[in-house]
Amino acid sequence: MPRPPRPSVRAVTFDFWDTIVAASVGSSDGMRRLQIDRFAHTVADAGQPLPAAELEDAFDANWARFEERWIANTGQYTPADSVDFITDRLGLAVTDDLRDRLIDGFRRVGERVPMETGTGIDEALELLRGAGVRLGIVCDVGLTSAPTLRARLEGLGLLRRFDAWAFSDETGWFKPAAEAFAPALTGLGVDDPSEAVHVGDNRRTDVAGALALGMVAVRFTGFHDRSPETGPEAHHVIDDHRMLPRLLGVA
């Protein structure tokens, strides 16, 4: 028996990191390297210089702690949480002023790290909007806050393309939870998720979350191809966002 036709696409949501943009700093570990350097400079200024190996070990442990929270979906792990964990692990003497400066360091790195956009993203967004498709963002926030991420999109001329968004530090939920997608879908006027598409790079979060909701899932490999990672495969895999409008039959 033939399948009934899928509803027409009303909305497309995008992951943020490694889908719309990626940090581009000319080093293998990107933003993390800048965060470590900023932290080291700040504590050295406070008269507590640290061996690089100890600081890198503390950042490794901190990121493992973030990933535990991320995978368990037990709430956002903030720069303040990171500073408290790292300084305690290193046995640093922390005044309120030093703590504030260390926390602010994560914001400054997020504001200044060079970024590159995913191949074809601007053209794809323009075509989708021109076809009447509403656009949103569903983002698992790491240590750079939603206001900073929105400001970076504005600086890249992309924020105006989007109609709604859901950042985990504002929603309290990480993907693949349905609650992570809900604010964006609601903001886009989508009552039936099968009328929407989600584009992201991560199988465990983006693809699994979209499939569970009945959305069309598209995996973007333009920055990284995470083929070995655990999780289901998407309906479609693309490495250039310009493939998306035609793939969805809207251009």
Image: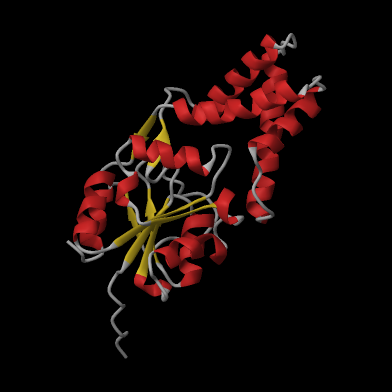
- Relative to 178, residue 43 above or below: above
Is 217 left, or right, of 130 in this rendering?
right
Most foreground residue, 221 or 152: 152
For the point 49% across and 62% down, the residue is 183
Horizontal arrangement in the rendering, residue 112 relative to residue 247 (left or right): right
Q: Is residue 112 left or right of residue 238?
A: right
Nearer the observer, 234 or 182: 182
- Give the farthest residue toward the bottom: 1
Residue 212 coordinates in the image, percent (x, y):
51, 69
Rendered position, 134 above or below 103: below
* Residue 113 visible in the picture: yes
Residue 248, by quadrant, is: bottom left
Is there any visible trace of residue 29 in the rendered image? Answer: no
Position of 249 with respect to 77 (left or right) is left
Percent coordinates x, y for residue 165 in the rendering: 44, 55
Residue farthest front in this picture = 97
* Relative image position of residue 111 (x, y in whole percent): 47, 29
Q: Quadrant of the N terminus?
A: bottom left
Is the residue 208 above or below the residue 149 in the image?
A: below
